[in-house]
Image: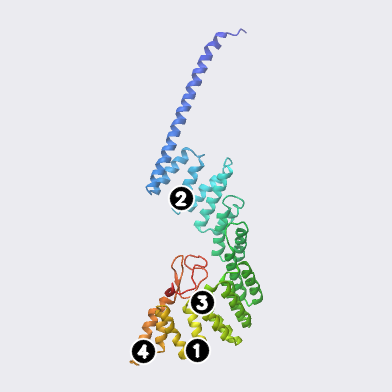
Amino acid sequence: MEFDLSWILLGLPLAFVLGWLASRFDLRQLRAENRRAPKAYFKGLNFLLNEQQDQAIDAFIEAVQNDPDTSELHFALGNLFRRRGEYDRAVRVHEHLLSRGDLGRTDRERAQHALALDFLKAGLLDRAEDALNRLEGTPFEAQARLALLAIYERSRDWPHATSIARKMHDADQGDFSTRQAHYLCEQAAALSSKADHAGALALLEQAVAAAPGAARARIDMARLQHLMGQPAAALATLKALGEHNPAALPLAAPLMVEAAASTGRSTEAQALLQEHYDSAPSLDVLESLVAIDTAQGAGEGARQRYVDHLDKEKSLVAAAKWLAGEKLEHEAFHPQVQRALDHAVKPLTRYRCAACGFEARQHFWQCPGCQTWDSYPARRVEEL
């Protein structure tokens, strides 16, 4: 069979022309798709800047459909869903990213972190905990541990919270010694409520060792020692509190008076409280000094302390306390006047959170409003 070379000579130019036409067609299609994708992306960005989140989401969905391999678009879309409260859609976006085999390590860790945030915002704490634990050893480790800490605090899982705080402290991710002390105190309170005073005392000793300057550990320890019938030990613990954290002494002043009275050392407690009062006048310390004077039979001298306090501080609370024992010209109206004064000073005797302004009649170590630790000063509202 003879082979005609003329067919080859005719076929080569034809194949070349067909290949060139095909490449041009593919290039036109690629350019059109590329033009559509940036257009949708920038349109979404424009909507986002104008705070039109619904339109932005539609534009980003269109961009993702045009270019499904672009991870940045997925991240933008997932974050938008989370901000709108559409957590299930945000979870689907980030889980889709994690399921991709071609995703790089950096983007995979970023998607894992975003998924954990989705679960956190949705209130799915168990799934959030699992997602956050997967971030150990990644650049998101510190953020993940902080989020875990918030979860454990919220669920009052103090042993796990203690473990995380210790890890962060040991890894130089912040000073968490005071947090560890708080968590140990919470565990001690739980044991004490079950009458396991020995176990509670051991935990409080750990708390003092973890944060020697933390006020709560020593105050809780002194309260427990007094409950266990060890007032001398309680008084010694409170004296140590005055040395390590004198600003917190007003919180422990009534307990100090009680422990001193049980050991017959009221004069010693009085001298220590007086020294503190002279350097930093405080209503709680003043009340404790008045209580000691009254117990020693110096009732009029105790009332005089309120007048002396008014020379130092313009205190409506001290004025009301002094007037409570004063003989007025129209004695019949004294109860009404006293009730009015007591009502007026009630807000002034509260404690106020320095972080969010939440006020309460009792002192909290963790604010019930914003959940911040140690945000309540040891002084009443009137003294701030």
| Mark 1 residue crowding within 10 angstroms, few (<14) / some (14–19) / many (20+) | some
Q: Residues within 10 Å of mark 3 (few under 14, many from 20)?
A: many
The amino acid at mark 4 is His
Q: Amino acid at mark 1?
A: Thr
Nearer the observer: mark 1 or 2; the answer is 1
Mark earlier in primary sequence (2, 4): 2
CB under 8 Å between callouts 1 and 2?
no
Q: Earlier in the sequence, mark 4 or mark 3?
A: 3
User: Is there a contact, CB below 8 Å, between mark 4 and mark 1?
Assistant: no
Q: Quick check: 1 above or below 176?
A: above
Residue that label 2 marks: 81
Distance between mark 4 and mark 1 Cα atoms: 22 Å
Task: Tell me the tag on residue 250.
Answer: 3
Q: Is residue 377 visible?
A: yes
Quarter of the rendering containing residue 201:
bottom right
Label 2 environment density (alpha carbons within 10 Å; few <14, some 14–19, many ≥20):
many
SS at circle 1: helix
242 left or right of 56? right
Q: Residue 334, labelled with which disc?
A: 4
Q: Which residue carries the number 1 mark?
A: 294
